[in-house]
Amino acid sequence: MSGTKVLRSLLHELRLSSPNGCIKDSLVARYILDQYKKHQTTELLHCKARNEAMFLGQTYLTYLESLRKHKELYKQFHASGERSVRETADLVGFKLPTDPK
Amino acid sequence: ATPPKRFYKKTSILGSDDGFEVVLDHWKLKTPRGTLFTVRSEPLAIAVATEFDAQKEHIERSRMHLSALCFTAIDNPNNLSKLDMVNYLLNFIPTDTLLFQYEDEKDLQELQLSKWDPVIDWFNHRLETNLKKTTSLTPSAVSEGDKLKIAKHFQSFSLESLHGLIFAVDTLKSIVLACAVMEEMLSVEKAVALTRLEEDYQLKFWGRVEWAHDLSQQELQARLAAAVLFVHLNCSENIVKQKFNM
């Protein structure tokens, strides 16, 4: 993925994972933007530091994305927990002792 | 038992003599053993603070892989030495996923040849070893010379980084793949795809089950990405050093 795409996706993921959806003051957003500015201009064709920074950016993006997707999938399929006593009773057509006759 | 509730509003980091600490409101983060949490790398501290900030109502420790890796590295709960960890990794080689290939199904074999062999070749070239794949049930023999070279390579990692590397190897079930992704020869997604090669191949016939296959894929990617970040952020370029600009 190109640099700008990674940056946009990173900021998007950070916004999704932050508690109130606002990343203006977030430490990590500022750090990433600083890193991007730092590696923006280079006179070398293959800059090792820049490639490393790109790789780390992409890896962090994968991390955030995979965590989010895993949580969504888990919530969707596995998170409803145990059935309550009432639900189990309704399932088999029984009444609970607390129900009126 | 329900996980603990999020008890802090803001997270931040604090620089100290030994490195960087993470602060939750006004409490300093501590490891499960009670040690003060300190890391030498600023981006790593920021990432851990962000992980804590991303928790909603409850603190889901099982989803905070980067924090878990940092805690393990600081606490070293099993008291592992570098030698213990290198030996653990060395014992993995004979049963490395990429070295076990299946000849009887032609399509699968072609996939393995085209996708796994280049990574094995890269590994052999990079570490000057001669690891051979096997197509039977018995693992192929690894020469003592190769073991020494691989051990030497792992010894070059710091004690903290080795925790990350072991995490990666456990996730991928392969030393070859773990090294390839650490050296940026493969992306995290690619490495996970390669470790799941046979599974992906089988599910083309039998169908993809979202709540199992996708779930495991995302989990492997998250774990591996955390391991890679942890190892990279623990190496010297990301640690603050005083630089005198001429």
Image (tube, coloured by chain):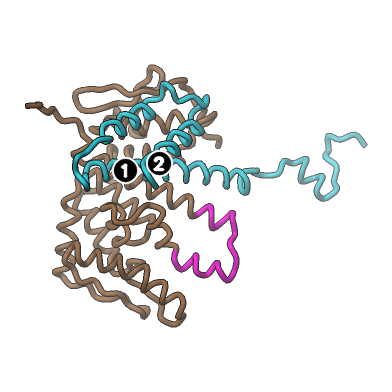
Chain colours: A cyan, B brown
Whether pointer 2 and pointer 1 mark residues with C-beta atoms closer than 8 Å, the reply is yes
Q: Earlier in the sequence, mark 2 or mark 1?
A: 2
User: In terms of depth relative to the viewer, which is nearer, A34 or B98?
Assistant: A34
A80 vs B175, left or right, is right
Q: Position of residue B75 (x, y in %)?
A: 29, 38
Q: Position of residue A12 (x, y in %)?
A: 48, 35
Residue A68 is a magenta residue: no
Residue B212 is a magenta residue: yes
Which mark is drawn over residue A54?
1
B233 vs B170, left or right, is left
| Residue range corresponding to the magenta coloring | B197-216
User: In terms of depth relative to the viewer, which is nearer, A3 or A83?
Assistant: A3
Q: Residue at x 27, y 40 (%)?
A: B233
- In which quadrant of the rendered view does residue A55 lie? top left
User: In terms of depth relative to the viewer, which is nearer, B218 or A95?
Assistant: B218
A36 vs B57, left or right, is left
The residue sitting at the right extreme is A101
Which mark is drawn over residue A6?
2
